[in-house]
Image: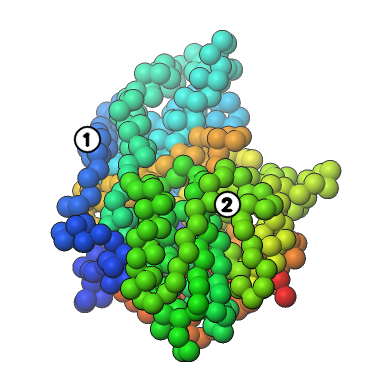
Amino acid sequence: MLRQSVNYQLPAAATSCSRSYLDSRELAFLSKEEHSSPGPERYYYNTPEKLKNNTTIKEAWPLSGLSVRGISILRGSNDAACVEQLLLHCATALESSDTTFAQQIMWVLNNIAAFDGDPNQRVAAWFLKALVSRVSRTLLSFSSSPPRFLPSSSPTAAANTNLSVFQDSCLNLDASSASCFDNRLLTPIQLAKFVDLTPWHRFGFSAANGAILEAVQSRDKIHILDLSITHCMQWPTLIESLSNRPGGPPNSVRLSVLTARPSVPPFVDMPYEELGTRLRTFARSKRVNLEFEVVSSSDLIPGLFQIRDGDEALVVNCQLRLHYFPEIDDHDGPHLDHHGLSSPRDEILHLIRSLNPDMVTLVEEDADVTSPSLVDRLRAAYNHLWIPFDLLESCLARNHELRLQYEADVGRKIDNIVACEGEARIERLESRDKWSQRMRFAGFRQLGFCDEVWGDVKWMLEQHATGWGLKRDAHDLLLTWKGHNVVFATAWTTG
């Protein structure tokens, strides 16, 4: 798929991908000390210098007129279609244990890739890094005897280079580059700016909050089970909306937060108990009585949440979280294995269904990287994860520290999808259609989004770069970038 880079212009009132200001509700949620001096300079990251430097061009492999087993490469061939095909050829070679050919393609990709180049070069750099990481991990798993895809004695120039030497030179992937995946801790104000940078999270917040407001509009007692990865940043907006609803705020709002989460960004430098204290203080200022419950468990099991009988409305909020629960990689059906047993992912949905919630909001990225085939998985990941690199080009300078760190977070996801297998591969996105099948299989009925929710999400997107779009598909809301699906939002009930 050919994707040309287009220079989208920001709205006149904006100066970056995000709004030029933090939401007033978030600021009230954050400490006064942090709010006193917001700005990009508040981010303290440790970006390896080697990630900021362009990769060295290998003179032994000039791009002009190069042909590798019928793959013709011309100088400057760094467009998306060329990069994608080279990556797929490399993945195919690795799957067929042809490391000589894989090395040849890696050398070609290394001439294209650059962590500080244009979006296509940056995408190439992170996918190439993941492929090299995959080879390295495979070698480590064969410490007693070398695998059969070690470099052969083929006379092809430069392809005989020892793999360890190649790994050290390709993209400067020495040990220090691993620090780009450090679990850097953000303060709450930094977390707010991270979330505010693009609509990737904001879209789901707006759509889910709108659906929740409609579902509990006449209820005085509300219980929300929060399954998300963004440390309660969704809730200040909902709390204010509840405080301003016709008829007054509810008598009580109970928020149960599951502290166990996958080891993925963003990470916050504050315990959940303190986040809860700040959120309660904010809610009190809005005349909302908030109970904040921290649920400490590594597993979702029946009885984990204290569900109160009576007139308490129960909402389960799932924001970019469920795809980290394991799924079954058999493609005879997304729900049952060959023995008729539900997958862990389906078991979670059945557990949620057993709670008999009034509403379940489900927000996920619209991509499918669950295939056991490396080639299919890489193709799906490439056709989805080029988007962050492209959108950041429209709003941040190429050497901007925040951009480098945001891209490193995306690179972390790419590395997990491409380089890892088995339980280590936790990034297991599924398509919108598969999630809909799973939800119906678990006994849920889908709801739609009202026009007011559509309008609120549309307004939010207008504060960001003009490449963002919104569309409806049946009952779903979809966030798009230049027409490509990015994230979808759905709402479900058990009635």
Q: Are marks 2 and 1 in contact (CB under 8 Å)?
A: no
Count neighbours of disc 2 (C-alpha within 10 A) and say few if under 14, some if 14 to 19, many if 20 or more: some
427 vs 286, left or right, is: right
Residue for point 57% across, 52% down: 323
Residue for point 38% across, 31% down: 107
Secondary-structure class at tag 1: helix
Residue for point 50% across, 25% down: 137
Q: Amino acid at mark 2?
A: His
Q: Position of residue 488 (x, y in %)?
A: 53, 66
Give 87 or 326, whichever is nearer the viewer: 326
With respect to residue 188, does 166 lie above or below?
Answer: above
Give 251 or 465, whichever is nearer the viewer: 251
Distance, label 2 to label 1, CA atoms, is 33 Å
Most extreme residue toward the top, as rendered?
144
299 vs 72, left or right, is: right
Q: Quadrant of the C terminus?
A: bottom right
With respect to residue 31, does 357 lie above or below?
Answer: below
The residue that label 2 is drawn on is 323
295 vs 117, left or right, is: right
Q: Position of residue 26 (x, y in %)?
A: 31, 66
Most extreme residue toward the bottom, as rendered?
246
Disc 2 or disc 1, which is closer to the eye? 2
Q: Which mark sits nearer the N-terminus, 2 or 1?
A: 1
Give 199 or 160, whichever is nearer the viewer: 199
Q: Position of residue 58 (x, y in %)?
A: 29, 29
Count neighbours of disc 1 (C-alpha within 10 A) and say few if under 14, some if 14 to 19, many if 20 or more: few
The residue that label 1 is drawn on is 49
Q: Amino acid at mark 1?
A: Glu
Tell me, yes or no, if residue 458 can be seen here. no
Tell me, yes or no, if residue 30 can be seen here. yes
Secondary-structure class at tag 2: helix
5 vs 396, left or right, is: right
